[in-house]
Every structure is written in C-alpha cells, then in structure tokens.
Image (cartoon, grey):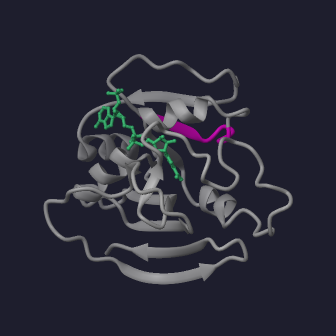
Amino acid sequence: MHASFEGSVFIAASLDGFIARRDGSLDWLPGANGQPADPAAPSDGDYGYASFLASVDSLLMGRATYDTVLGFAEWPYGTKPVAVLTTRDLVLPADPSAVVSAVSGDPAAVAARLVDQGRPRVYLDGGRTIQQFLAAGLVGRLVITRVPVLLGDGIPLFGPLPADVVLRHETTESFASGLVQSTYRID
Ligand SMILES: NC(=O)c1ccc[n+]([C@@H]2O[C@H](COP(=O)([O-])OP(=O)(O)OC[C@H]3O[C@@H](n4cnc5c(N)ncnc54)[C@H](OP(=O)(O)O)[C@@H]3O)[C@@H](O)[C@H]2O)c1
C-alpha cells in the first residue's frame, strides 16, 4: 500500500547515540541552533545537507524537534512543506513562506496521507519520530553523522524495536572536523 513512501533520515548524533541533551540542548553539535559553524573550525561544507534536502518532497518532524527549530534565528526549510507530528495546537513560524501543517496518528496512516498529498519522499526528523517509523518499516535511507563526543545521557536516536532491523551500509565519509558520516539503506 505504501510502496511509494520513501522515509529518509539525516541526523547528527553523539558517538554514544544521543541527538540532544536531556534538556534538548544542541550546544555540543557544530553549527547547531541555526547558527553557522564556527568559522575558525576546519571547513567541511554542509556535510551534504543541501543535496539531501533537495532529494525529499517534504519533512515530517516530531513536535519536540519543531519547537527547537522555531527557536532558530531563521526558518530553515524555505517553502518545503513541513508536517509536524503533534497532539497539540501548533504555533506557526513567523516566516510567512513557511508551509507547516499538523498531523497525528500511527506511522502507516501518516505515511499514506503524505503519499496521497503527493509527498512520498519524506525527511523524517526527531528521535521518537524516527524510532516509530523504523519500527513500522517505513525508513529506507539513513544518513547518520557521528560527532566525536560522548554525552553519557540525552535524547536517544534509537530505541526499542519489535524485531531486528538489518541495514545495508552504502558509504562512509570522514571529515577534517572529526565528524564521520555513514549512509545506510533498509531494503
Ligand atoms: N542532532 C540532530 O541532528 C537532531 C535532529 C532533530 C532533532 N534533534 C533534537 O531532538 C529532540 C527531539 O527529539 P524527541 O525524540 O524528543 O522527539 P520528536 O520526535 O521531535 O517529537 C516527539 C513529539 O512529537 C509528537 N508525536 C510523536 N509521534 C506522534 C504521533 N504518532 N502522533 C501525534 N504526535 C506525535 C509528540 O508531541 P505532543 O503530543 O506533545 O504534541 C511527541 O512528544 C530535540 O531536542 C531536537 O532538537 C536533534
């Protein structure tokens, strides 16, 4: 039924697998909070982010990630549609060009809705969001950038699964900054 849904992940994680501190802070992440990376740091470009973003039709992110993005200096997604998984009323971005809607429900139903809306290639963002879509078998591509720091605790990228998920490693690239980016497929 969802043969044409293509869920993709592009995310940075600490070496011990966290995407944010417990309080949601991203201070350990180079170039986080919508700010440019430290100009004094070795330049690694955008780690493939712009071309990844160009490869998707829309984004689907959890409410916690959306609330973080709302705090950035600028809305980072232009006119690309962003669906926010939430059970609560949405506060819209100040940028009038932002295209944001609220969705809820189980991953299969949400995926079917995005396919119906003509947005089958979806960038999935947020830990709990990614975990639900992985558990539902709706993730086909993961680009994970490991930051060489151990946080010890935080919001985890991965979580419990109903069964093993076997990934096919495609590429790994290491950057002068020490970040290591791997791309995996799930067939
Ligand atoms: N390192 C990185 O590259 C990176 C990338 C993205 C995010 N982050 C960070 O990760 C943190 C957020 O991750 P997270 O795991 O806490 O959560 P998340 O996936 O961003 O959001 C979880 C929230 O989304 C809503 N939600 C999730 N599934 C839903 C469903 N099926 N139906 C309706 N609502 C649903 C619920 O919010 P409500 O019910 O409260 O509405 C839930 O509490 C933030 O701190 C963010 O900055 C880091």
Q: Nearer the viewer, residue 147 or 143?
A: 147
Residue 36 is a magenta residue: no
- Image position, residue 163 (x, y; %): 14, 66
Q: Looking at the picture, does residue 87 appear above or below residue 143? A: above
Which corner quadrant holds the N terminus?
bottom left
| Residue drawn at (53%, 68%) of the image | 146
Q: Nearer the viewer, residue 137 or 30?
A: 30
Q: Is residue 123 visible?
A: no
Q: Looking at the picture, does residue 138 appear above or below residue 75? A: below
Residue 174 as seen in the image, left or right of residue 62? right
Q: Nearer the viewer, residue 12 or 98?
A: 12
Q: Looking at the picture, does residue 76 appear above or below residue 52? A: above
- Image position, residue 11 (x, y; %): 51, 58
- Image position, residue 100 (x, y; %): 54, 29
- Image position, residue 52 (x, y; %): 60, 62
Residue 83 is a magenta residue: yes
Q: Is residue 125 visible?
A: yes
- Considering every residue shown, the one lying at the far right of the view is 40
Which corner quadrant holds the C terminus?
bottom left
Which of the 4 image quadrants contains residue 62? Answer: top left
| Residue drawn at (47%, 28%) of the image | 101
Q: Nearer the viewer, residue 26 or 86?
A: 26
| Residue drawn at (33%, 45%) of the image | 128
Count of numbered labels shown in the rendering: 0
Residue 131 as seen in the image, left or right of residue 97? left
State which region is magenta. Answer: 76-84
Ligand 1, by image quadrant, is: top left
